[in-house]
Amino acid sequence: MPKYDVVIIGSGLGGLFCGNILSKEGLNVCVLEKQKHLGGNLQTFKRDGKIFDTGVHYVGGLGKGQNLHQYFKYAGIVDDLNLKRLDMDAFDKINFQGKTYSYAQGYSNFIETLAQDFPKEEEALKNYEAQVKRICNEFPLYNVRPNLGQDNEHVYYERNVGDFLKAITPNEKLQNVLAGNNLLYAGIPNKTPVAIHALITNSLIEGAYRFKDGSQQVANLLVESIQRNGGTLLTDSEVVKLNFENKKIESAELKNGELIEANSFISAIHPTLTLAMTDSKLLRRPYRTRINEIEETISVFAIYISFKPESFPYLNYNYYHFNEDSVWSIPNYNPKKWPQEYLFLTLPSSKSKKYAQTATAMTYMKYDEVGHWRNSSIGNRGDDYESFKKYKAELLIDQIGKQYPGFKSSISNYYTSTPLSMEAYTGTRNGSIYGILHDSNEPLKSRIAPKTKIPNLFLSGQNINIHGVLGVTVSAVLTCTELVGMKYLLDKIQNA
Ligand SMILES: Cc1cc2nc3c(=O)[nH]c(=O)nc-3n(C[C@H](O)[C@H](O)[C@H](O)COP(=O)(O)OP(=O)(O)OC[C@H]3O[C@@H](n4cnc5c(N)ncnc54)[C@H](O)[C@@H]3O)c2cc1C
């Protein structure tokens, strides 16, 4: 094995985007992935000849001139993406207290549409736009400009989204409606930093897109780019140890004992897993304790539905449904009332514009509800586990059937995933949906820098910065600036 310039652990978007940047910048990179397939949460799977998305359903910022578009342009993948823009007048529909509200794309359209349901709140909605934009403007990399340490990002990690919305309007219904897609960030009103709400919501209002035939295309394009640039990607290569000698990491040790040497290492997996790979004293105990004690986001139960041919329409929006009088389901989580909310969406397919081939529905589920099956291997968890999944899936299907007549009779087959599947496939602790939980009450605790005290070990992925396609792309850029320079890299991206 050659000695690489950079070894990257994990081939999710975080690892692949780092691989793309660094290989483009002339470094000899090697991406190590423990699974048989590359892509992490970008992966799709096929059943009954149809494609299902797993961990990415829609994204913002992909319109020309927008942030993700510019990052993907630099990466050389933007022109090859097969995208479907969601409905301009309703990319998200929020069903709350029995009425459906729409989020439209473009701020004026967004305000006009919601003002039809909240005519007295037009000024509040205009203020919402101004405040969200003001917050987003404080995040340099979000705006594709170098972070020179002069911005006020931290302020918006110290303020929670619940208080922010209360300051926008005293109208509780509108507060709820404005937070209606908080499943996108596992929102908790008195904990989730307003930054997370603003950055995600703003990018979707600016432009909301799905990946036609699935998000695997993003992973495939990044893989091809890395290979074209001379990089190496190895699957079935689980890193179990980082060997520390001479005050730095010398090699990544694989499960089969093989050593992969490099000058620098980027770990784009959960930081607690990275810490467990080295006992180097350079990573001091308080740092380890802080990171190991960060709370995780809740987990999720999902069903993947395969439709009979030409039976269920393709819906060019995402549907969020709430059974309770609040959209903040996590603090009110009650297994007896499950599912209290769900997100339901169909995947656009190149085979038909009119009909959906597949759909996904997801709702929160706590790890404890399945934790006792964790020690059995996948496919071997016994009849109890299978009955549990079937029971839960049918509860969820019944709920969706109430909103979409004809839904149940259109299903030819369905598959499920539980917090145990999430844990097994992504390596997140307790199958957490988006990795670590950012808490505005302890903002510094959950902020993890890409740089570590080991001079050649860097971190990346959704736990550095924030989760999601845009968040993880920014995280990868941030990590790579440590190796190639902030101004240099951002100049290149801006001028791509
Ligand atoms: C159900 C769900 C729905 C989502 N929906 C959306 C959405 O609609 N839009 C959006 O923008 N975001 C969405 N997200 C979030 C988004 O998918 C993630 O934030 C993002 O993909 C995380 O990328 P990552 O590279 O940090 O991690 P991952 O994609 O988890 O990649 C980590 C990789 O590291 C590998 N790995 C772990 N340990 C090791 C090891 N020891 N050695 C080698 N490899 C290892 C894993 O196998 C995995 O491939 C969703 C997430 C989930 C779970």
Image (cartoon, rainbow, N blue to C red):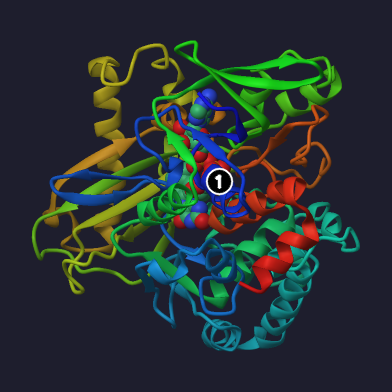
Percent x, y of residue 12: 49, 42
Above-or-below relation of 151 to 29: below
Quadrant position of residue 174: bottom right
Q: How many marks?
A: 1
Residue picked out by circle 1: 19
Identified at 75% across, 43% down, the residue is 439
Quarter where residue 210 is shown = bottom left
Q: Nearer the viewer, residue 355 or 340?
A: 355
Question: Can residue 434 be seen from the camera position used here?
Answer: no
Q: Residue furthest front?
A: 2
- The percent coordinates of residue 63 (x first, y second) are 51, 77
> Does residue 159 appear to the left or right of 205 in the view shown?
right
Q: Position of residue 445 (x, y in %)?
A: 80, 36
Q: Is residue 326 left or right of residue 292?
A: left
The picture places residue 285, in percent across and down from the top left corner, at 83, 17
In the rendered structure, the answer to whether residue 59 lies left or right of residue 7 reads left
Q: What residue is drawn where x is 52% and y is 60%? A: 181
